Amino acid sequence: MFNYLIGNSDAHAKNVSVLIDETGYALAPFYDLLCVQVYGDERLALFIGDEDRYASVGAHSWEAFCQDCGFSVKPTLSLFREMAQDVTKALSSPSPSIRRLLLPSHVLPIQNSKVHMTHWMTSSRL
């Protein structure tokens, strides 16, 4: 869901790892998180429901996703909206160290990502 919000069409199963130790399993820190949609990549590496393009993803896609994963729809979409709001806030006020790195060419991915977040935060279909 996070990858969808930031426009990371390159999110695939090889970008998710599990750490194993004597206490059990834990999700590894995320890596390879970037907005590739800004480069024209509209295809998703992993389907959301039956959809593999950003433009086709809608509430039906997330409902199918939840069903595929065994998640309850309402709480999952509620967390999705919350995540979209949190990511939007983070993008709206980057830390000084990140702000220093932002060049004009790097602003576009942030703006494109906000389109997805705004849509899902305000959608009455969810």
Image (cartoon, rainbow, N blue to C red):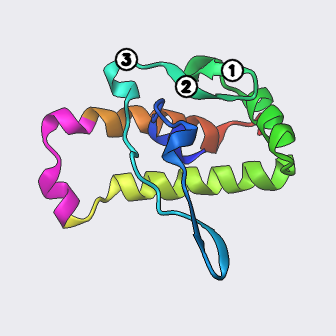
Distance of label 2 from label 3 (alpha carbons): 12 Å
**74 relative position to 53: left or right:** right
Furthest residue in direction bottom, as rendered: 23
Q: Neighbour class for label 1 at 10 Å: few (<14), some, many (≥20)?
A: some
Q: Nearer the viewer, residue 22 or 107?
A: 22
Q: Is residue 118 visible?
A: no
Give, as a single range, the part of the protein colored magenta. 97-107
Mark 2 or mark 3: which is in front?
A: 2
Q: Badge 3, how many Cα within 10 Å: few under 14, some, many 20+?
A: few
Q: Position of residue 3 (x, y in %)?
A: 51, 42
Left or right: residue 108 versus residue 124 is left
The type of residue carrying mark 3 is Gly
Q: Quadrant of residue 21?
A: bottom right
Residue 44 against residue 68 in the figure, above or below? above
- Residue at mark 1: 51
Q: Amino acid at mark 1?
A: Glu
Residue 44: mark in rendering: 2
Instruction: Give the quadrant of residue 25.
Output: bottom right
Residue of label 3? 40
Helix, strand or loop at label 3? It is loop
CB atoms of marks 1 and 3 within 8 Å: no
Q: Is residue 119 above or below residue 24?
A: above
Q: Residue at x 63, y 81 (%)?
A: 22
Task: Say the numbered circle drawn on residue 115.
Answer: none
Q: Amino acid at mark 2?
A: Leu
Q: Horizontally, is 33 left or right of 57 in the view?
A: left
Mark 1 or mark 2, earlier in chain: 2
